[in-house]
Image (tube, rainbow, N blue to C red):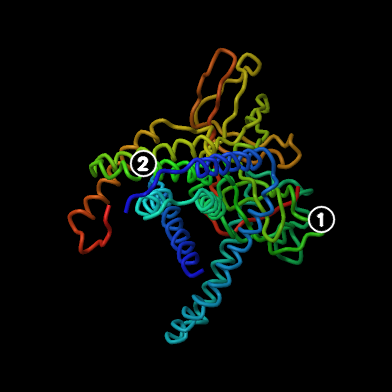
Amino acid sequence: MNRLIKRLLIIIFINFIDQNIAGFFSDLLIIIPLTFLAYSFYVYRSDNNIGAIEAFLVGLFIDLISDSYFGLNAIIFCLITYVINSYANAFKLFSYLQICIFFGLSCTAYVGFTQLVINLYNFSYLILFVSAIVNIIFCVMIAAISVYFPRNVKMKI
Amino acid sequence: MARISPTPSQKITFFFTTALGAFILYLDITTSNFDNIKNGFKAIKISSVYMVKNLAIEPIKSLINLSRSKNELIQENKNLKKALDTSYLNNYLISRDNIFFKDQEIIRKAYKDGEYTFEYDIAQLRNINPNMYKCCDKHRMFIEVTGTSEHGYKESIVFNSSGIVGQIIDKSKFSEVLLLTDITHSLPIKSESNEFFCNASGSGRPEIIICSYNPLVWNEDIVLDQIFYTSGLGGIYPKNIKVGYIKNIEKISSNLTNLEIRLFANPLDDNLFGVLKY
């Protein structure tokens, strides 16, 4: 129970940060889906496979707190969980750069899909392209920090 | 430790949950079945923030204020700020180039007992998601109206000190306002000469509404920075209220032109709004 509450609070906190930085970045045509990235990283780092029900419920909860359509995050979270579960062992053969590109492109797919649903009339390929580059750079930066400052971050990619 | 690839039963579960998610998404987009849950959650969120603020932050603030012996001054400052905001709304209503000033049907008791008393209610902003407002098609905000109207506030106009921002579409604990820029909103507008009429739809972009018209039907020359007014044809908004000015003219084809109109009023500018039943 404590673990569940802890996870919910972490999701709410990350989503809160996500929504607060989104306003600033949207002026620069950038979307960084922090909640999605954090969840993907959690699935990636997990010792065991994350179940479909858990992914679905987390997605539904994020739909509720982020004021988006119900089912939007639930679908994407189920898909990314399935993909990461399927390639969990293959990731060990990949370099950090390849993993960063994978997560960056996953974020771009997430941005594209969510924009198609919630912002269809103003869908912009420019936002998608800029977000892809920024997300990949963001993932590389996170990886670089964990590699070069392992004692400070205590987070292993 | 190695992780095993999803088994066939896990794959079926993933497929099932994804399909269920798609079905729920389709239901939410096409119907309003989940609105009660969303509005309930928003009401809880707003109330809890309000409560936490009152219980946790306000006492700390007042303690600090008490130690500085500035309580009364701060309270007076708050009252003055509210009075100033209200006077901005009043100024907007009585402004000389505004039809509100001239129409006695709208303001029935414009002058009473030596002071202005308008028949509109003050509303406090309770919730607006600036991210949704900046990024997405759905532009809504929640306000708390302080008055007690007998007929309710549904379809009432909401305005701030710069102009009209939208209309109330739903009333639960807080009133939901459909902003002019929401893509589902349509506002009948006209030019100053009364020779051009058009329905301007929300663009999903901040402060922008779009009016599509056939230039073969409407002969009037539309120029940049030309001001547009409400036509009063929809029955919701009164006529001749300044809405915005032309920001961009886009010729799509020989029989279709889009006018991008930049609104005068931005809902993010004020915390205090006026609610008027027309």
Instruction: Please provide percent x and percent y for residue B122.
Output: 66, 60
Q: Is mark 1 on a helix, strand or loop?
A: loop
Residue at 54% x, 14% y is B253
- Quarter of the image for residue A104 reads top left
Crowding near the residue tagged with mark 2, few <14, some 14–19, many ≥20 C-alpha atoms within 10 Å:
some
Residue at 31% x, 38% y is A133
Q: Is mark 2 on a helix, strand or loop?
A: loop
- Quarter of the image for residue B117 reads bottom right
Instruction: Please provide percent x and percent y for residue A16.
Output: 45, 58
Instruction: Please provide percent x and percent y for residue B255.
Output: 59, 14
Residue B268 in view here: no
Q: Is residue B119 left or right of residue B222?
A: right
Tally of numbered discs: 2
In the rendered structure, find residue B151 and report the number of the disc placed on it: 1
Instruction: Report the front residue among B195 and A156.
Output: A156
Q: In this view, does A29 lie to the left or right of B271?
A: left
Instruction: Please provide percent x and percent y for residue A151.
Output: 20, 63
> Which residue is outermost to the right?
B150
User: Of the residues shown, which amino acid type is indicated by label 2?
Assistant: Tyr
Residue at 50% x, 79% y is B73
User: Of the residues shown, which amino acid type is indicated by label 1?
Assistant: His
